[in-house]
Amino acid sequence: MNSPTPVIQIENLAYAYGRAEAVHDLSLNVQPGRCYGLFGRNGAGKTTTMKCLLNLLRPQRGQVRVFGLDPAKAEVAVKRRLAYVPDQVAFYPWMSVRETLDYLASFRANWNRKTEQELFERFRLDPAQRTGSLSKGQRTQVALIAAVCPETDLLVLDEPTSGLDPIVRREFIEAVIGAYQEGSPGKRTIFVSTHLITEFEGLIDEFTIIDRGRVVVTLDSDQARERYQKIRARFAQSPPELDLTAALRVRRNGRELELIANGSGPELVERLRQHNPESLTTESLALEEIFVATLKS
Amino acid sequence: MLMQISFKSSTPIYLQIVDQVKDAAASGALQPGEALPSIRPLAEELRVNRNTIAKAYSELESLGVIETLAGRGCFLKENHSVLRKEVRRKLLIEEIDRAVVQAHHLQVPRDEFLGLIHERIAVLDDKRRANENQKEVDRP
């Protein structure tokens, strides 16, 4: 079976600022139509990776391909098919919101006015307001409108919601789902880097966790929730001495035991059950808890 | 219908939605001909990937639980299984086997297990009746 060309291919990417290595031997693939998360702490190498995709930095080793093309050699061909929302949004402060969007639209072959109008209303923005007097949240909203309206195949989001209030964050996500994904169902690809994982939880199909420039793990979200489990058991007396080396983490308190399992959940549950616990519950870890568990172990 | 999802369940999100629609159909909370929420508003409301909802609905459609009417949305179907009787039996047997194994591990004896099955069917019947009565009350 022919698999389609990945929208993003990163192979053994390395980049250092002077002697400080920001990204080391990083590889990942993003398939068309997927929403892919790049998760890492501050300084993990997320933005450096993003910049290599956008030809804002040249890879020092390895290679990146976007739509199968080298972003350094085919910059225009790549950029006409993607839109980008950076973490720090900057516009010409003397321009109004309307002028800013018209200016940005002038670089694009396509601009959906209906979507623009819909998002204006959703975000309650004033087209006449100068961008210099917008709040951080409003600047991000304008940047999102500018990224969604050209209806590109790929949307790249770099820490898009950090520093925004919870309501603006929610509206941001809803706009990405409603306005961007709806346009060409099943075909629009999203690549998002963030350390605010909870709010993207439902959107992410697949993710890579990076730490100090290296890939820690790449997982499909559904598989991740199946693999990573939190098991709680309470015993009548103090918990029996058990072999719990299969657990990623163990917490004990009095008669209670809490385990974090990575793939070994069923085995651990069986072992606990043999000691007749008063109660035994299992739940999956949310992506953010997986992130924390992975980086702490 | 108001859907709920949980990221703490090991069941994939799309299957959680499939299961809820099936439950609602079995209990009569969702009536044949009744509309399901449209994909976009539901995805926005639950803040999940649009494709997740689309996947759930296409699964429900292939199971014959719902039908999509072009331009109008998705609706619960009358008498819904498109599968042949043997296939339906086989699918149910798999589920029953799983419950039987679970009963063994939880040390629930045969008679108690059979009693529980009768009890659960009665619970579902009660729900159906309650939803029927509700419909009568709602009727002007």
Image (cartoon, coloured by chain):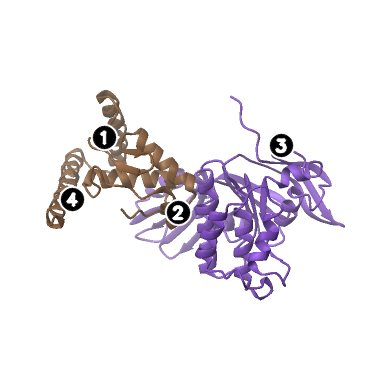
Chain colours: A purple, B brown
Marks 2/3: CA–CA distance? 34 Å
Q: Mark 4 lies on which chain?
A: B
Task: Indicate the quadrant containing the N terminus of chain A: top left, top right, bottom left or bottom right.
Answer: top right
- Distance, label 2 to label 4, CA atoms, is 27 Å
Query: Gap between marks 3 and 4, in whole Å?
Result: 55 Å
Measured from the top left, where is residue A104 in percent x and y? 69, 58
Q: Residue A68 carries which label?
A: 3
Q: Give the CA distance from mark 3 to mark 1.
A: 44 Å
Asked if badge 3 and badge 1 are on a common chain, one would say no
Q: Nearer the viewer, residue A150 or A42?
A: A150
Q: Looking at the image, which residue is at 43% across and 47% down?
A: B13
> Residues at marks 4 and 1, common chain?
yes
Give the structural element (helix, strand or loop) at label 1: loop
Q: Which chain carries label 1?
A: B
Q: Is B130 above or below relative to A172?
A: above
| Residue assigned mark 2 | B7
- Label 4 environment density (alpha carbons within 10 Å; few <14, some 14–19, many ≥20): some
Which residue is depicted at the point 36% across and 36% down?
B61
User: Which residue is outermost to the right?
Assistant: A18
User: Mark 4 highlights which residue?
Assistant: B127
B135 shown above or below B103: below
The residue identified by callout 1 is B80
